[in-house]
């Protein structure tokens, strides 16, 4: 059981955000890559790799059977300490090429929760593509996790430059709600499992071994008292996804693992202040209501600093104003970016009167971004048809 859960938690967690208009692309040293040998039915007639900005790399891919649509892909959160490279999405890229789509994608200039740079580098791609291959008949932006939030931001900010958007497992309820969830999970973990983990929801020592310092001790404590994990899953502010104890425990480990992996990077970006506060939060639970007074009295409290609050707003809070067709895709039991994000987005979109431009799809499955290629390409094909015909697809 121990090895199984830790293996499930050792996943790449994807996220990002920005508030200023992207700068113009500054390309350096683009080179033509020999057309790849056909993979299945795909044959790339031209593939170009180059660099923009400080350290980001882009890739432009033209299939022999191009249908005239350009797909701009946005990757998710990558640990800040890892090397900056092109996202490894070759299977998805080739599946899109087989369907006739040209594909453009990019690394960011740096890893971590860099929404601003991710948005800028992604927004440059359509111009780079047009300068090389000519203007596409339409451009669709799609992305995973943090890339899903960037996808939504591009759709809201530039509805005349993109004709459709496909955020997948995206932080579409906004960075503030995502980090509130992660912070609340860590704060409640420390209440229910005191003195198990180093640091707290607002600060951590340097984490050099995630398994030894965080996941191993957390799992041992949970397995000794799994009831408290079940209680946490039934608290309104920490709805750990799962339909059985294994999924719930994995979701709890995933959340505290994400907190440990990302806290230093996010705090540094927020001018040294942790972008989390719970001093005005009243934790609630319908099935465990009698336990809530003690929790609210005993949980450690943190205050969100004004500059950290501003960083959250900039990185990014969706407006819900959709001027182009948007299809979202989410697994029902996502332990990294819970599906409650979709409900938040739906309310915002309804408030702007643009619900006709939103179609939300869910896949009954556990995991973060655990979609099949057919589910992603199917959603993209439906979006492309929606743009072409003006007829909103079925759910």
Image: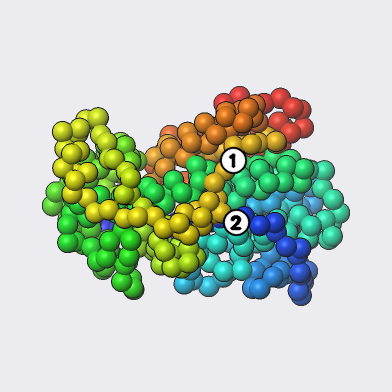
- Estimate how packed mark 1 is, as few (under 14), some (14 to 19) or many (20 or more) residues with alpha carbons within 10 Å: some
Identify the residue at image location x=76%, y=63%: 24
Q: Position of residue 253 (x, y in %)?
A: 30, 53
Q: Judge left or right: residue 259 versus residue 15.
A: left
325 above or below 14?
above
Residue farthest to the right, as pictured: 134
Helix, strand, or loop for circle 1?
A: loop
- Estimate how packed mark 2 is, as few (under 14), some (14 to 19) or many (20 or more) residues with alpha carbons within 10 Å: many
Q: Is residue 10 visible?
A: no
352 above or below 300?
above
Helix, strand, or loop for circle 2?
A: loop
Q: Position of residue 359 (x, y in %)?
A: 59, 31
Given residues 239 and 392, the one toward you in this image is 239
Q: Position of residue 208 (x, y in %)?
A: 34, 73
Q: Is residue 297 visible?
A: yes
Q: Quadrant of residue 49?
A: bottom right
Identify the residue at image location x=71%, y=31%: 386
Residue farthest to the left, as pictured: 224
* Residue pointed to by mark 1: 319
Q: Quadrant of residue 324?
A: top right
* Residue pointed to by mark 2: 18
Identify the residue at image location x=71%, y=69%: 52
Dot 1 or dot 2: first in sequence order is: 2
């Amino acid at each position: 059981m121990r090895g199984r859960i830790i293996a499930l938690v050792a996943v790449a967690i994807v996220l990002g955000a920005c508030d200023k208009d992207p700068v113009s692309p500054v390309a350096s040293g683009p080179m033509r890559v020999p057309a790849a040998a056909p993979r299945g039915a795909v044959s790339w007639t031209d593939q170009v790799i180059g660099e923009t900005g400080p350290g980001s790399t882009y890739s432009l891919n033209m299939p022999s059977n191009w249908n005239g649509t350009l797909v701009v892909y946005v990757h998710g959160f990558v640990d800040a300490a890892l090397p900056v490279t092109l996202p490894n999405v070759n299977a998805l890229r080739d599946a899109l090429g087989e369907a006739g789509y040209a594909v453009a994608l990019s690394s960011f200039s740096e890893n971590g929760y860099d929404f601003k740079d991710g948005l800028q580098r992604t927004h440059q791609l359509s111009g780079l593509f047009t300068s090389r291959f000519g203007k596409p008949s339409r451009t669709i932006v799609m992305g995973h996790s943090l890339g899903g939030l960037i996808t939504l931001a591009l759709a809201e900010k530039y509805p005349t430059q993109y004709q459709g958007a496909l955020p997948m497992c995206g932080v579409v309820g906004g960075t503030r709600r995502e980090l509130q969830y992660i912070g609340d999970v860590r704060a409640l973990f420390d209440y229910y499992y005191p003195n198990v983990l180093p640091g707290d929801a607002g600060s951590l020592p340097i984490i050099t071994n995630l398994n030894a310092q965080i996941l191993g001790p957390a799992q041992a404590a949970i397995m000794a008292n799994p009831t408290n994990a079940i209680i946490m899953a039934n608290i309104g502010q920490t709805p750990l996804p799962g339909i059985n104890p294994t999924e719930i425990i994995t979701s709890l480990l995933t959340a505290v693992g994400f907190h440990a992996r990302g806290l230093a990077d996010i705090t540094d970006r927020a001018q040294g202040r942790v972008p989390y506060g719970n001093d005005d939060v009243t934790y609630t639970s319908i099935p465990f209501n009698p336990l809530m007074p003690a929790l609210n009295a005993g949980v450690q409290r943190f205050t969100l600093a004004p500059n950290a609050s501003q960083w959250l707003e900039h990185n990014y809070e969706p407006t819900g104003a959709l001027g182009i067709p948007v299809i979202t895709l989410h697994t029902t039991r996502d332990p990294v970016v819970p599906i409650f994000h979709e409900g938040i987005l739906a309310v915002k979109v309804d408030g702007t009167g643009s619900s006709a431009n939103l179609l939300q799809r869910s896949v009954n499955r556990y995991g973060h971004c655990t979609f099949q290629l057919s589910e992603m390409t199917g959603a993209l094909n439906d979006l492309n048809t929606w743009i072409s015909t003006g007829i909103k697809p079925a759910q």
